[in-house]
């Protein structure tokens, strides 16, 4: 479903602030793969997601999604192919618009816009049923402004918006990092449910080792702009947090700093 082939990205090249964020990165996701991504700060995790989403162009390499070379496509032209949920619950929604209006915007992502606007009765029925699945009572608050929702409710809505028109790829960018542990667990459980029910190919960045092990069918570890570890199947299920820390050290990464940066998870 996704091929990242020899991707390189350097910020501020030729200056004192030059930073090689991605260094010959290669990654292949099969259809339905749910891959968790861990690594210390500056490992290249967010740069990889931003490059995949088209936030900025890569210096070298190719990005192929479902057989289509999207390397040169700008972010807005990838919008109908890729769903994304950000770390900040305030991103991804229009807080001053009603819940049903936000969902309608998501449903029209990537389509040509005209002067006609409005949420049809058929759409309202669809949104009502989809919101009911979240189990948060939001199906009875469809005319409420999204800005009035809690952080967890907003992330649940953003997740629903990201998959409303089944994307080729779902990107979860530390989408529970700003939530309290209880709410984060609920959003992760909901993420699992939505990914499984829709058989979505998914990349999820997390700093929490426990979450990285518990969720998804595959785990990759990044360091200095490339992948140093790729574990899946039974090997992933048997992993412990300490084993991950040991593997990080065995790969030559700086365990002193990264052990602190990677949350072992409660």
Image (cartoon, grey):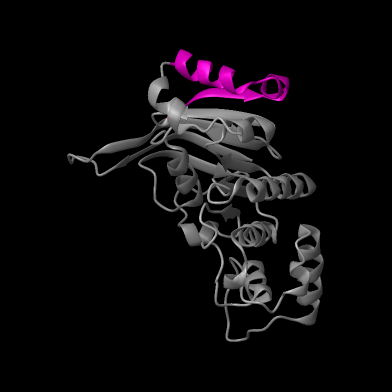
Left or right of 160 in this view: 248: left
Residue 137 showing in the rendered view: yes
Q: Measuring from the top left, give residue 173's x and y in whole percent.
A: 53, 47
Residue 216 showing in the rendered view: no
- Quarter of the image where one finds residue 29: top right
Q: Measuring from the top left, give residue 95's x and y in whole percent.
A: 55, 72
**Range of the magenta residues?**
226-251
Q: Is residue 54 above or below residue 260?
A: below
What residue appears at the point 57 percent right and 54 percent down from the top-left corner?
Answer: 85
Q: Measuring from the top left, give residue 44's x and y in whole percent.
A: 42, 36
Q: Which residue ends up furthest to the bottom in the rendered image?
A: 115
Left or right of 258 in this view: 217: right
Q: Is residue 101 above or below residue 62?
A: below
What residue appears at the point 55 percent right and 77 percent down from the top-left corner?
Answer: 96
Q: Is residue 238 magenta?
A: yes
- Quarter of the image where one finds residue 123: bottom right
- Quarter of the image where one finds residue 253: top left
Q: Measuring from the top left, give residue 230's x and y in whole percent.
A: 58, 24
What residue appears at the point 75 percent right and 81 percent down from the top-left corner?
Answer: 120
Left or right of 246 in this view: 238: right
Left or right of 94 in this view: 188: right
Work out which quarter of the rendered image holds the N terminus and state it: top right
């Amino acid at each position: 479903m996704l091929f990242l082939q020899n991707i390189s990205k350097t910020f501020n090249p030729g200056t004192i602030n030059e930073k090689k964020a991605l260094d010959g990165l290669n990654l292949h996701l099969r259809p339905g793969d749910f891959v968790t991504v861990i690594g210390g700060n500056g490992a290249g995790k967010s740069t990889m997601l931003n490059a995949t989403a088209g936030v900025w162009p890569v210096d070298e390499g190719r990005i192929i999604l479902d057989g289509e070379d999207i390397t040169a496509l700008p972010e807005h032209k990838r919008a109908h192919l890729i769903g994304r949920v950000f770390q900040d619950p305030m991103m991804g929604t229009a807080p001053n618009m009603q819940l049903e209006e936000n969902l309608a915007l998501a449903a029209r992502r990537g389509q040509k816009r005209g002067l006609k606007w409005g949420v049809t009765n058929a759409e309202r029925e669809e949104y009502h049923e989809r919101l009911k699945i979240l189990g948060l009572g939001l199906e009875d608050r469809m005319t409420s402004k999204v800005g009035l929702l809690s952080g967890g409710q907003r992330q649940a809505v953003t997740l629903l918006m990201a998959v409303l028109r089944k994307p080729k790829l779902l990107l979860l960018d530390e989408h529970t990092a700003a939530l309290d542990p209880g709410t984060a667990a609920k959003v992760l459980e909901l993420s699992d449910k939505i990914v499984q029910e829709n058989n979505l190919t998914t990349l999820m960045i997390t700093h929490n080792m426990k979450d990285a092990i518990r969720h998804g069918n595959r785990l990759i570890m990044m360091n200095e702009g490339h992948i140093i570890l790729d574990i899946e199947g039974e090997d992933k299920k048997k992993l412990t947090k300490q084993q991950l820390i040991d593997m990080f050290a065995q790969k030559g990464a700086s365990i002193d700093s990264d052990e602190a940066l990677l949350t072992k998870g409660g």
